[in-house]
Image (cartoon, helix red, strand yellow):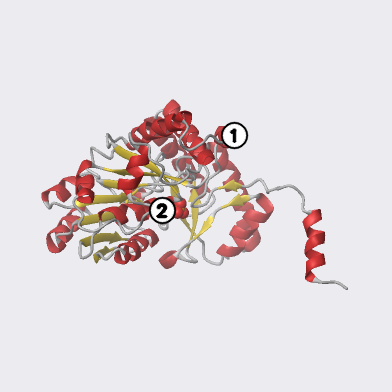
């Protein structure tokens, strides 16, 4: 008699230890983690209240302040991916009925809209076609019209490859008594950010894009202005896991148990941040810029065009127009299966129109560009 049980039993005994294909991850994230980061992650775990581990947490905090260029006391890593840190920003400062103005020019702007609504915000939006950015004048008019408690913008819109300029936005927000919340998930580590100089009050990121770590430990920071709004809340933060008053007691002096930190991910994040500190943050920004310009030139040399205006293109993510007559999906599939290179497909308004190529963190190297462009040329010729 064969039952599903005996088949499973056979499978159980035949399973070999984990083996994964070696891929070059040049999509919208994750990017390949630096080998030193992978090594740090395979170190034996410490207890989450061990003084040695608490010391690592302190180092993560100072290193995060460095890469973000902020003095914010409340700068921590959230145990979860970028989306958890994103949710944390809104959960902590939004109270029912607060006007939250969101710049929507891509997929992640829409995600902020959905999240803010769930925390009871009175959500207003300004919109742009995917691939464009908001001008300072447009932002000023919207602040005057909506008088929001919070303005949320995506610095690096991963669905479009556009970089939203932030200079002077913080000043405008201060004139209107508005907190400035910024998504820096695809910019931290790879795109110039000066959080304090730009007057950003709340920001979040992830570990697996510009920082070159595995996903799961996500940078989060809030200014003293944002902290004040949190302290003055009439209602408790609706999300227990992401409540910064509780988390602040674990990351701060009290060291009160809140949750078990994903120890090995924090090791990885600490190593990834240390590598950036060793390189120098300005050098890391310059490296990303230099390599992406090389990518654009190389792609143009095989006849491809970019979707975003050059001055607003991201150093970390490029949207490449799929040429007429080329099957975009067939190309990404062949790149992955025959060349072990992952690139991303278009989302939303850009679905079927672009590929998304990431050069993030450890992967921002000339060698990655050379491998991709050579493979892409071969594969495109097949698919015509
Ligand atoms: C990737 C990304 C997120 C979500 O981060 P996860 O780590 O995937 O949860 C949020 N915002 C932007 C702009 C992103 O690119």
| Viewer can see residue 208 | yes
Left/right placement of residue 154 relative to residue 364 reads left
Query: Residue 328 at what x, y percent from top left?
Result: 56, 63
Against 64, residue 187 (above or below) is below
Mark 1, other Cα within 10 Å: few <14 / some 14–19 / many ≥20: few
First reached walking from the N terminus: tag 1 or tag 2: 1
Name the residue: 51% across, 45% down.
Answer: 298
Query: Gap between marks 1 and 2, in whole Å?
Result: 26 Å
Q: Residue furthest right?
A: 1
Query: Residue 315 at what x, y percent from top left?
Result: 41, 44
Query: Residue 374 at what x, y percent from top left?
Result: 61, 47
In the picture of the structure, the residue carrying the numbered disc 1 is 44
Question: Residue 68's image quarter?
Answer: top left
Query: Residue 56 at what x, y percent from top left?
Result: 45, 31
**Front-most of 196 and 322?**
196
Beta carbon of the mark 2 residue lies under 8 A of ligand 1? yes
Quadrant location, the N terminus: bottom right
Beta carbon of the mark 1 residue lies under 8 A of ligand 1? no
Name the residue: 52% across, 56% down.
Answer: 344
**Front-most of 119 and 327?**
119
**Front-most of 79 and 186?**
79
- Label 1 secondary element: loop
**Front-most of 255 and 359?**
255
Left/right placement of residue 293 relative to residue 98 reads right
Name the residue: 19% across, 45% down.
Answer: 225
- Label 2 secondary element: helix
Mark 2, other Cα within 10 Å: few <14 / some 14–19 / many ≥20: many
In the picture of the structure, the residue carrying the numbered disc 2 is 84
Front: mark 1 or 2: 1
| Total marks in image | 2
| Viewer can see residue 363 | no
């Amino acid at each position: 008699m064969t039952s599903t049980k005996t088949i499973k039993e056979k499978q159980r005994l035949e399973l070999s230890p984990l083996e994964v294909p070696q891929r070059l991850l040049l999509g919208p994230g994750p990017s390949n983690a630096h080998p030193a980061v992978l090594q740090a992650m395979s170190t034996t775990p410490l207890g989450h209240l061990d003084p040695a581990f608490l010391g690592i947490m302190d180092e993560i905090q100072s290193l995060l302040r460095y890469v973000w260029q902020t003095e914010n006391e409340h700068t921590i890593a959230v145990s979860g991916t970028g989306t958890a840190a994103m949710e944390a920003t809104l959960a902590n400062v939004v109270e029912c009925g607060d006007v939250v103005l969101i710049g929507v020019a891509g997929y992640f702007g829409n995600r902020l809209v959905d999240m803010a609504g769930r925390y009871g915000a009175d959500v207003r939006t300004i919109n742009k076609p995917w691939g464009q950015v908001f001008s300072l004048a447009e932002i000023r008019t919207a602040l005057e019209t909506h008088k929001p408690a919070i303005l949320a913008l995506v610095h690096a819109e991963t669905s479009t490859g556009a970089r939203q300029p932030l200079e002077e936005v913080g000043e405008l927000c201060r004139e209107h008594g508005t907190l400035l919340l910024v998504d820096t998930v695809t910019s931290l580590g790879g795109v110039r950010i000066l959080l304090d100089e730009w007057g950003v009050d709340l920001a979040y990121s992830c570990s697996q894009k510009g920082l070159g770590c595995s996903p799961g430990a996500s940078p989060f920071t809030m200014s003293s202005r944002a902290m004040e709004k949190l302290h003055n809340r009439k209602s408790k933060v609706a999300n227990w896991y992401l409540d910064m008053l509780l988390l602040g007691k674990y990351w701060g002096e009290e060291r009160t148990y809140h949750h078990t930190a994903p120890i090995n991910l924090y090791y990885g994040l600490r190593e990834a941040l240390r590598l950036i500190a060793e390189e120098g943050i300005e050098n890391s920004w310059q490296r990303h810029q230099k390599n992406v310009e090389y990518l654009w030139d190389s792609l143009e040399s095989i006849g491809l065009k970019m979707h975003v205006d050059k001055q607003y293109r991201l150093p970390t993510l490029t949207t490449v127009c799929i040429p007429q007559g080329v099957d975009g999906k067939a190309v990404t599939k062949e790149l992955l299966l025959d060349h072990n290179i992952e690139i991303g497909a278009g989302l939303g308004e850009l679905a079927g129109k672009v590929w998304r190529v990431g050069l993030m963190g450890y992967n921002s190297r000339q060698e990655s560009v050379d491998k991709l462009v050579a493979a892409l040329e071969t594969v495109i010729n097949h698919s015509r």
